[in-house]
Amino acid sequence: MTLFLTNSNKRVYPSAKKGSYKKPYIAQGETFAYQVSIYNDSENLLHISLNIEGKFKHIIRACECVLSVGHTTWVPLEEIDGVNEYLVPEILRPTNKMDVSPFSTVSFWVTVSEIDEAGDTFDTINVKWTVDDKPEEYEEAGKAEYYISDFKINKPKSLPALHWFYADAISDYYKLKLWSDEFWAMCKKWMENYSSHGMTHIYLPLFTPPLDGIKKPTQLVKVKILNKDAEPVNRKFAFDFTDAKKWVKMAKECGIEGFECVHLFTQWGVKNPIRIYLDTEFNLTPTNVKLYDRDIELNSPEDKANLAVDVEGEATGPEYRNFLSQFFPAFKAFCEEMGIYNDVWFHVSDEPSLEHLENYGKAYKLLSELKPDIKIMDALSDREIVDEVLKIMPEGAIFMPIPSIEPETFNDITHGAYFCCGPRGRFINRFFDTPLQKTRMLGAIMYKKNVDFFLHWGYNYYYISQKRELVDPYKTNDGGVYPNFGSGDPFVVYPGEEGPIDSIRWENFYDSLQDFYLLDNLGIDRESDILKDLITYKDFPRDGDWIWNLREKLLKG
């Protein structure tokens, strides 16, 4: 049996026989992790139990491997982690026990937190192991050294960040009725996990999100038509925000600061209104009662009877304008009651391209007329669309584009950053075969580039892409559409029996945010020489020790 240490920004594959460990430099108020790996050089099955002794709080989790569908396409060989290694260390199972098969390696992920004392220190690593039915053996196997600075992080979460949080996936996976007591109890565990990894904002599904195909009705706001016999353009609506209040209150309890409201127009085109369902409690008809229990044929008479507006109508037509003109005053009252009026963003439409310029401009103009102080952010990478919006943006409104990390044309304006199934190649991403040290550079680069927001779509999307068909995320990690999605793109956490289970990629991503927080708390000049190697999201150091060397420069002495 051989034990070795590895930093948290490198994967340890079952075929590994050694690792590298660079002494971490950590600020008080941060968390960090290292890996304890054990190689079994015998013909026997080893049963391992790991224990850690040290000054601070420790959580030990076993690094469990999953099967990748294949390497990410359109990525050069030198940018792929674990070439031909299809068993990828990924899931962090809450246990300090593992079995090690002959001539292979397992790893434990050790997270250190509640760090509040400066100086050089170390953890003592203790291993208990047995072979077959022989008596248990014990040994002090090594030490993990690290340095704690006297500098303390005073402003964590200094970068607003979010992932799309899929309430329907939690409901479907656990077979819980949306907005039931059982759902709320489970949802809170997911929100706590979400917030604990640096997320400051969360999706607020006022209406069913128009994302990733036609989804099951997932709508917090109850909608009632008061005059059913009136023409659509003359309908009067009532809104019940009871469930939305529960969502906001729970999110705040979990440490979430802001909310991104549902996209108000259809995805990839801005062509139509979104699907806004009439509430079953307000409108008790046979079709509505069935709506939440089974799929119905989309756009059939049965389906259309459940909708507040015509989803095949014009995005900015009089019918949808009538609905939104009544919704926004009701929404404002809700926000003021919950104390979130200044912490709410809306979306127009997801990922519009230049061919959608006219539609996007009309949609934005409609929203800004109905709500002149509206705050809009969108995953939007075409600068021409942004420039058109800036021409018509009313005084008091805020517009923040979130471009893909590929474009370099947004540096002169306030902007965020996002990536998803692309870009690939030499760009940062976080697939199963993206080197962890590459993703880890994200936070420092976003700091250098003065990014104001981070967005990613895949927190917990457990479906076949664009369909309602649920997948087993432990077996299907590409949305069923490889190579369009790389392995791991749709999610970073796994559904466990009691709640979410973290992945190595999720922990590594949060570590990158902590690098941002550290630079921000220290007030490092973005033009400082210590950041000169960070050029773009594809031009940066690949050396896994670079981030540890940076931290040593920032925190030593």
Image (cartoon, rainbow, N blue to C red):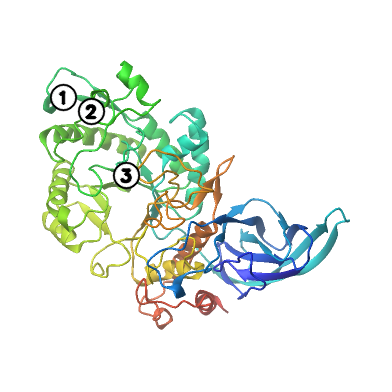
Residue at point 63%, 60% (across, down): 109
What residue is disc 1 on? 235
The answer to whether residue 154 is visible is: no
Q: Is the Cβ of the residue at disc 3 closer than 8 Å to that at disc 1?
A: no
Q: Which of 76 and 310 is in front in this view?
A: 76
Residue underneath mark 3: 211
Type of amino acid under label 3:
Leu
Q: Which residue is drawn at 45% across and 65% down?
A: 517
Residue topped by disc 2:
308
Q: Of the two numbered discs 3 and 1 on the same chain, state the one appearing first in sequence.
A: 3
For label 1, the SS is loop
User: Given this view, does label 2 or label 3 mark the residue nearer the observer?
Assistant: 3
1 or 2: mark nearer the eye: 2
Q: Which of marks 2 and 3 is nearer the N terminus?
A: 3
In the image, residue 277 above or below residue 402: above
Q: Which amino acid does label 1 sit on?
A: Arg
Which one is earlier in the sequence, the residue at label 1 or at label 2? 1
Q: How far apart are marks 3 and 1 (CA)?
A: 27 Å
Q: Report x, y in % for residue 373.
A: 20, 47
